[in-house]
Amino acid sequence: MKPAFFVGAAAAATLAWVRRRHLEPPLLVGLAIIAVGSAVYGTGLIHPPDLEQLLEDLGERLGKWTYLVVGLLAFLETGAFVGLLAPGETAIMVGGLVAGQGRIDIVTLIAIVWTAAIAGDVTSFFIGRKLGRDFLVKHGPRVQITPARLEQVEGFFERHGGKAVLIGRFVGLVRAVAPFLAGSSGMSLKRFLPYDVIGAGIWAATFSILGYVFWQSFDQLVSAAKQGAFALGTTITVIVGVVVAYRWLKVEANRARLRAFVHEQERRPVVGPVVRLAVRAWHRVRGPVRFLWDRLTPGQLGLELTTLLAITIVGVFNLVGPLLTLGDDRALVAGDARSFEIAENLRRAWLDDAAMIVSDVGQLAVTGTLVVVVALVLLARRRVVDAAVLLSGMAATVLVVNVVKDAQERGRPLGSLVDTGDSFAYPSGHAAYGVAFVAIAVAVSRALPGVVSRAALVAVSVVLAAAVALSRVYLRAHYLSDVLGGVGTALACFGLCGMVGLVVAFVRQNGRTP
């Protein structure tokens, strides 16, 4: 017995009964089918086939044909709205699984999935452009999509369409319909396409690589991916709800209406005691809630300080965590051996050369010089605090890296493709110094106009820092745990210096937002 499905059946039946006079017959029939199917499945008498297992077995048998099957599913998810029935992440990870078994090439797979996903999105976009608005105007009122709501949707895509397309790529049901809604709302193709290309690329690479790396534990991976997608969707829903509520409450008339509604409920004999109790409880927790709200909103040492604190905590965790498990000078930590296996599978002559070039970019001579140059430019523009944070963060990173290296004395991996000298392995200096690119981008981005340009600069810097860090593993100059420790060191140092700089700037400006 599965009680949750009985609850779903009851909800579908109730909705069909309450809305029976307003819904079209096909929708009523669909709700009835959902209600009956959920009730029958809830009895446990019917066991549908395991779709994930079928896909896994199919991928193992197809071999090179996996390219075609996975690419076709990536296209159909949005191009034919198949994503409304089955999530595409599973199929993509199956492709990564087959690549992890050595039957297909992971780079080719990512390219095919990326291209197919874009093609499906563009197809759905033009379907929405061709049929969307007329279809919604004609049939929308039957499902409560009134002309006023349609105008709101069109206005939303006009203001936030790019972000909706980008973020929606990682939320199941939204991914299936977002391109259609973008087309039907009148969003231009030249605005839709850049966000879609970026989102589809990140999506294709993420789930292909997940399947490739964790193919030996595929069942656990699929479960974690589903939970992650659900958590992302829930987070987005909560954030949108909070933003809408905040904007609504900013209007004095709306606050007055809310107070009048609460006072009216207090006088009711049944719900009045509960409402009065809730009001008293709100007065007790209003202070802590206000404090938390101030920490999560920009300005007044709010979201900025909270973000830096979170970065610092993550950094300390990444630095200290491996230290608790390291034993002798070449003891392996979880992920060290597997990362080398993946590197060997990816080994190519041209990739070796590229990794060496990227690795050199993370040298202290390069990153340190760049930090000094940017700090001098910031000083010339009278941004003293930003310059001080960059310089102090870099200095602290160099100091901590060398102190921990000498204290830990961890030996380097055998078979390094680059000269590592006599220095110790933990933490990785290149990985730590590479984080300076992100710190520089954050400081410089504050002078750029528009959120998109700032986000693009920071995103590029993050990719560069990650490439530097991973190149050290690929070249066998460091273990993966060394790299994580190096990144953690830099995050902790720059985060701590950033918090100090933020407080100093706030105090200097006599309480104004820094």
Image (spheres, rainbow, N blue to C red):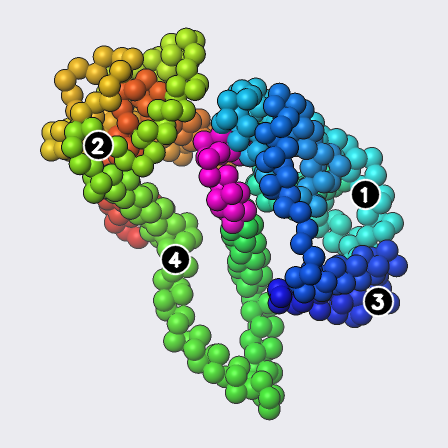
In the picture, measured across the screen, residue 382 lies left or right of residue 250, that is left
In this figure, which residue is indicated by the disc labeled 1? 133
Residue neighbourhood size for the residue with mark 4, other residues' Cα within 10 Å, grouped as few (<14), some (14–19), many (≥20): some
Q: Is 217 drawn above or below residue 329 in the view shown?
A: below
Q: Nearer the viewer, mark 2 or mark 4?
A: 2
User: Upstream in the sequence, badge 2 or badge 3?
Assistant: 3
Q: Which mark is residue 294?
A: 4
The residue at 76%/63% (across/down) is: 36
The magenta stretch is 206-228
Residue 500 % position (x, y): 24, 44
> Which residue is most to the left?
407
Name the amino acid type tagged 3.
Arg
User: Upstream in the sequence, badge 4 or badge 3?
Assistant: 3
Alpha carbon of mark 2 to alpha carbon of mark 3: how far?
A: 67 Å
In this figure, which residue is indicated by the disc labeled 2? 331
Q: Nearer the viewer, mark 2 or mark 3?
A: 2
Residue 98 % position (x, y): 55, 28
User: Upstream in the sequence, badge 1 or badge 3?
Assistant: 3
In this figure, which residue is indicated by the disc labeled 3? 20
